[in-house]
Every structure is written in structure tokens, then in C-alpha cells.
Image (cartoon, rainbow, N blue to C red):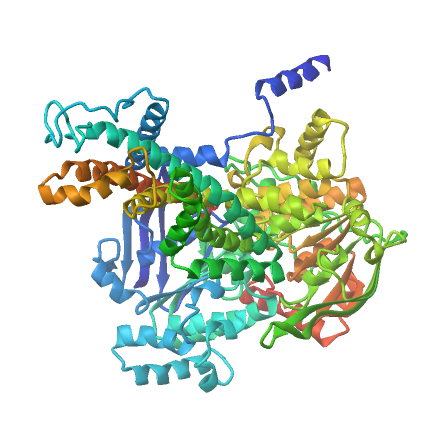
Amino acid sequence: MSLISFKDVTVDFNTPEGVVRAVNGISFDIKEGQTVGLVGESGSGKSVTSLAAMRLIPNPPGIISGGQILFQGKDLVKASEEEMRKIRGNDISMIFQEPMTALNPVFRVGDQIAEVLMLHKGMSRKEAWQKAEMLLDQVGIPNPKASIMKYPHEMSGGQKQRVCIAIAIACEPKLLICDEPTTALDVTIQKQVLDLMFDLQSKYNMGMLFITHDLSVIADIADDVVVMYRSNLVEQNNTEAIFTDAKHPYTKGLLSCRPSLEKNPSRLLTVADFMDDAGNEIEIDQAKLVPDEKKEKKEETPTLLEIKGLSTHFPIKGGLFGRTVDHFKAVKEVSFKLQKGKTLGLVGESGCGKTTLGRTILRLIEPAAGQIIYDGIDVTKLDKDQMREMRSRMQIIFQDPYSSLNPRMTVGEILLEPMNLHNIGANKEEKIEKAKWLMEKVGLTAAQLSRYPHEFSGGQRQRICIARALAVNPEFIICDESVSALDVSVQAQVLNLLLDLQEEFGLTYIFISHDLSVVNFISDEVAVMKAGEIVEMDKASKVYHNPQRDYTKTLLEAIPKGIPKSLLAKQQ
Amino acid sequence: MGMSKTEVLVNNTQASDPLKGKSLWIDAWQRLKKDKVAVACLIIVILYAIVAVLSGVGLIAADWGAEVGPSYAAPGADYWFGTDIFGRDVLSKVIHGSQVAMSVGLISSLIAIPIGVTLGALAGYFGGWVDEVIVWFYTTFSSIPQIMLLMSIALILGKGINTVYIALGLTSWVGLCRLIRGEVMKHKNREYVQAAGAIGAGHGRKLFKHIIPNVSHIVIIFTSLQFQIAIKSEVILSYLGLGVSGQPSWGTMIDDAKLELARGVWWQLAGATLAMFVVVLAFNILGDALRDALDPKLKGKD
């Protein structure tokens, strides 16, 4: 018998613009001890589906308007709020994407784990704390006796997610819902957390619903995969079949848009290559299916950027009057050269200093020591006015497309601002013409210039950020985790766009990312950073196929293979 | 080729500026419009404002000083709100009082906003010693009980309506300053501000062009709440004998009622209180609705 079965579940949201159907009559089952991966892009309805199972859809505006959710034979759609409270956190529990905000910052982690145990199991505070200590040990938190007294901010992101897992499994639930639990984590931490969840699942024989936008993450752990697209369930099958014999064009697109370490195409296939906007399958361009290999840019070009012994320090304040007592050395004497027209990939875990390095190169943060020589000019020596002029040659594209555009300015104003600052274009008409041209270059339309950022999707916003960077005709762009916040399907489009623009305008990139497969796809050279230093730097192909440092090897091993284990076994 | 050029031109002239779109303010207005109670409150506020302006230019209630009937006539068909000791019409006095109330709200806001926004923005944006000095200044300032401050300013400047404006303006910027400082601190680290720095924008541009428009909704909300605080404070000041003289205000009317109540004359108090109650309630509800409608957090990700 199934542990939980969704039968024709429909969820509607009442908005001022009318009723929006978030989930449209989907049906699937999860058996005891089975892991089902629920895959789809943001807005496809996958999170709403999981919230429906917990009956946590905010009402109003949301309502489960049809179907049944049978959990151990009981229809949760009809259950009373009282009954649901007993089920939540006890029989069904949930792990969220963002461990930073999923824990309450004012309580010790011990209290937060003990809370569910006291609530559902009727334990005393003392018993609950003892159990909590055991749970912390089980989820692999070092020194549980001391850790149980810690506050969330004293822990790293990975540890916080482990605490969330401890809370979720505290009552030994029958069903565990994981909503993108590893998306916010580094690749090495992601692997550890995935392994942990897999172990716990078999130990407690839990059913698991694993939600993600990235198929490669669940390849290893899911038994079945359910694919959602625009509120509909478009395909479901066992994992192996999904990976070898996908039927729906959207699934095919998802499978091929993720860059992998094995293949090295010059452009990524996107969902748009497999289906049109209306969702109909289209004839695949056979030439695209076997994409040409990325050509390594062999020809030597003049050096555009040379970094010599660059260091960045942040003051640590302390004492009575907030004096600087010490410095945190975020970047330590980094040196490298970058040739014109090439891409340097900068990889490392969060906190390794890669973002600080990028911002220091642009002097958005002042360096403590060292030289930044750009096209023969020492950028560190420039005064304020010269630096302002220099900014038109060096640009940056940020990570979060939601916060990097001013919400009170239209896209047109956003694109015109850099042109005004650098006197590009003779008059307003000329500038507007250029803005229109930029919009088309990044795959948007000129008519959208009068819109505000909130009217665009994440991928579209990142295109606007790219257009803004291009508005001043730069030669050099730093992409700081520029595709990390995007769905894999959108990420592929943006990566292709960056490569197209590089070819057309001869741009030089520094591409900062924690995602090694993305860096491999886009970079000519790769630098691996750890604790403020570059530990390994070489041609991308060399770093990936013949890593010299143990740290690089660890990073590479942690990348999800994106191939189900059973399939991997057959291949070997 | 020529065709497309003219087409572009026509398009340009049609939408007077191709860069302008449906602004967030219009968006907020459309959300506010759906809140029936808020719209009713807005209409009440506008009516008060119209009444205040009309009485200010002498079109209505100009004869508030005239003796129109017997002393202390109870409310009735002739005098809806009754008359006062000199036989003056209470309704005319209430109407005339709205002029004082509205102008106190408006002018004290106009004094408080520049101070609060400038200091708050500077403190939040630059941080460091600038922040410390400004924070020290306003914490010191706000540690003095507000009524004491009001009274001392009124005593220094002497009685009169101008004193009320200045006293209320100078004592109410602290809250706004705190709010703006916090919001600016939050926004200055947002990537859009850093992106502005990366395209070569200086401090002034980052602060005034990018950050301030994003925190300006606070000013609107502050104003709507400041209005009702100012109206109440004017009443208190006048009641304490430090406020308006020579013209009727709700405060002086309530002050007069001190002696009248003992004689069973309740209508002057009731008239002034009712007028104040309605407008304060309207501003309060409107302020809350504005906060919901203008909050940028509600936008974008939905």
C-alpha cells in the first residue's frame, strides 16, 4: 500500500488578477521507504504540491480545490486543523531550502529540537534534550554535548541544515518532505548532506519526497521521478527510465541543459530546443544534438589583466570604543594573469574569498596591498575621477537578480544611467536606441524598456543585468555567481548568452562560481581558491582531468554525477 | 527604411517617454483602491482638507466670531452644534478649527521630514562617526519628555500658531530619522547599490537617486501618522494654554469646555472631539493601509 497518494490534486490561488491554478490535477504515490524526486522549475507548482501535503498552503489566497491526498488511507484534504497539527512534524515533517532562516535565531538548537519532541511525544524537557543530543550525533554534528547549547548563528550553513534534519527526523516521521534542501549549500556540503539523508532514510524506512530544480541532485537517491511543468505533471517514471528514456520534451530539455564534466559542448542545449512556448514538442535540430566540442582558445592573446600580490583585509572591531583590534585576511597575496578574450573561472567554497577578490579587482573594496594592472594601467593608483572613467571598461554582474536591480527604476532608466554617467550616445534618442539594441542583444524586446524589474522573471532580470553591464561597452566583465540563483534550464540560456556575447564583442570574463561543472563549461582557465589563496590554477581541461591538489580532487568528487547509481553500475 | 524611422518617432511621441511605465506608485494606488475602508478614510481626509482650505480663504464659516444667537443654546434645528458663551455658532468654530488642525499637521510634517530624512539617510549611509554623532544627537533629544520639550519651545517662542508649527515639527523628526536610518542601512548593501557603484556612480547619486526613492514610502506613511499626532498635540498644547489664540481651534474649544461642563454644557467639547476623532481615525486607518500598499516587500517575488 502507498504511504501517501496524491489523487487529482488541484490547488488554486485567488489573486487580484483572477484565479491562478498552481497545481493542476496531479496524481502520484510514494510507498514506504521510497524516495520520489519532484522536479520542475520555479513556479511549476512543486513546492505548492508539498505544502498541500502538509496543508500549509496560506489560505487565503490558496485553496486545495480538488482531489484527495491519502496519507495511510486518511484524506488530508478533509482532515481538521486539529488532526493536521498532530500529523505535522510527527508523521510528516519537512526540511526547507534555506537553513539560515529555517531556524529561530533566538533559541538554542537544543530547544528547537526538543520542542517537537515535547509537543508530539509528550517528553519532559530533560528527556527531550537527551534525545536531542542523540539526534545531533546521528546527523553528524561534531561534539553534540557542546553543540546542543549553541545558537544558530554560531553554526555553519551545512551544520544548520543538519540541525533542520535532526528536527525533521526527531519524531521518526513516516514521510519526509525536502524542499530543495541542498540548493543553498556548497557542493562538498551538499554531498555530505545528501549522503546523510540517504542513510537516515534507509535507517528509519521513511518515505521521502525530494523537491529540486536540478535533476542531477536526485539521480543518486530517488527511486522514482515526477516531473512538473507549468502546474501539470508531465512525466513520471522510475529514475533509470527518466534518465535513459525520457518521453516528455521538457524532461529531455532538463536532462541536457546541465553542463557535465564529461561532455564539453560549445553551447548547451536548452528546454527551448525541445519544445516551443506552448509546450509542444519541436523537431530537434540534429546538428545541435551532437554539439561541437568547445574549442580551447589556443592562440595567445595579449595580457589584459595582471594581479600581483593582491590582498584584502577586513578590520575586526573590538574593545570598548570599537577600535580595530585585528584584520580578517579575506584575500592573501593573490597573483595571476588573464589574457584578452578569455575566461578565468574562479571556484571555491563559500567564504573562500572569491567574491571579495572579484570586488577588489574592480576596487569596489579597497585592496590592502598589491597591484591590479589592467591594460598596462595600475588600477590601484587611479584617483577618484580616473577610477570613474575606468569603470566603463570593467563591469560586474551580480548573483541575485532580485536585489541587483533598483525596484523603483524602469528597465530603460536602469540601462540609460550608465550611459549618462559615461557620456555614451550624443543625445537621449541615441541612448534610447542603444538601450533598445541592448535589450534585443540579451534576448528581450525593446517594448519592455518601460517595465519595472518586478515584472520580469529571475532569468530575464539577469539578462537585464547583463545589458546594463554592456551599456558602457566594457572589455572585461566579472560574473559573480551570476547563474547560481537561476534554475538549471534558465542557467543554460544565460550561459549560452554570455558565450555568444563574448564571441561577438571579444569580452574577457572572470567567472566566479561554486558550481564546478558550470565553471568547466564556460572557462578557459580555472583557479581554485581556498581560504583566500589560489591553490591551483591551470587550463580548465587540465584542472578537471588531472587535478594536482587534494582540495581540488575533493571538490570534483563532490559534484553530483547526474547519473543514477544503478545505471553507473551497468556502464562499468 | 524611412518608414521605420518615422514609426519609431511616432512611437516615441505617443508614449511621451518610452522609459516610463506603470510606476510602483500607481501600482500601490491600485492596491489601495481595493481597500474600501481606506478609500473612505482618504475621502474623509480630502473633505477635511477642502473644508480647511475653504474656511481659510473665508468662503465658509467666516462669521464664526459673530453673535448669532443666545449664549449656550443647546444643539437643535437652528444651531446644529449649539452656541458658546458669546452666542457664537459651535459648528462654525469646529469648521474653522479644522483649518488649524490641518495646517498644523501639514507644516509640522514639512519641518520634520527634511530633518528626519537628511539625518537618517546620512547616518545610515555613511555609518562610522557620522552615524555615532547623529544617533547620539537624536537619542539625547528623544530622552527629553516630548511634552516638556513642546512646552519649553512654546514658552521661548511665545504663544501663537507659528510656535505650534515649529514646536511640533522640531519634536517629531526623531521617529522618522530612526526608520530612515535603518532602511538606508539595509539598502546600501543591496546589490543594486553596489551595481551603481560599479558603473561609476558617486555617493550622492547612490544615496539620492538609488536609495532614497526606495525608502520614500516611509515618508508617506510617516506623514499620514504625523498628521494625527500633530492634531492631537495641538489640542494638548492649546488645552495647556500654550497654543493657538485669537482664532478657534479644537484645542481651545476643549480648553473652554473645562468650565462649561460643570454647567452641563457639553456640546462644545463634543463638537471638537467628534471632529478630531473622525479625522484622527481616518488618518490612522489610512496610514496602515498605505503601509500595506507601499511596502516593496510585498512586490516582485509573487
Identify the residue at image location x=61%, y=64%: A561
Asked if residue A235 can be seen in this view, the reply is no
Which quadrant of the view contains residue A364?
bottom right
Q: Is residue A480 left or right of residue A79?
A: right
Q: Is residue A380 left or right of residue B99?
A: right
Image quadrant where one finds the C terminus of chain A: bottom right
Identify the residue at image location x=73%, y=15%: B1
Query: Which one is nearer the viewer's eye here, B120 or A247?
Result: B120
Q: Is residue B162 above or below residue B149?
A: above
Image quadrant where one finds the N terminus of chain A: bottom left
Residue A497 point in image, percent of width and height: 68, 43
Asked if residue A479 can be seen in this view, the reply is yes
Identify the residue at image location x=27%, y=82%: A124
Identify the residue at image location x=43%, y=61%: B143
Q: Is residue A437 above or below residue A198?
A: above
Q: Is residue A506 left or right of residue A52?
A: right
Query: Which one is nearer the viewer's eye here, B176 or B156?
Result: B156
Residue A537 point in image, percent of width and height: 79, 66
Which quadrant of the view contains residue B93?
top left
Query: Which one is nearer the viewer's eye here, A279 or A186?
Result: A186
Give the total of numbered labels: 0
Residue A451 point in image, percent of width and height: 55, 33
Which quadrant of the view contains residue A32?
bottom left
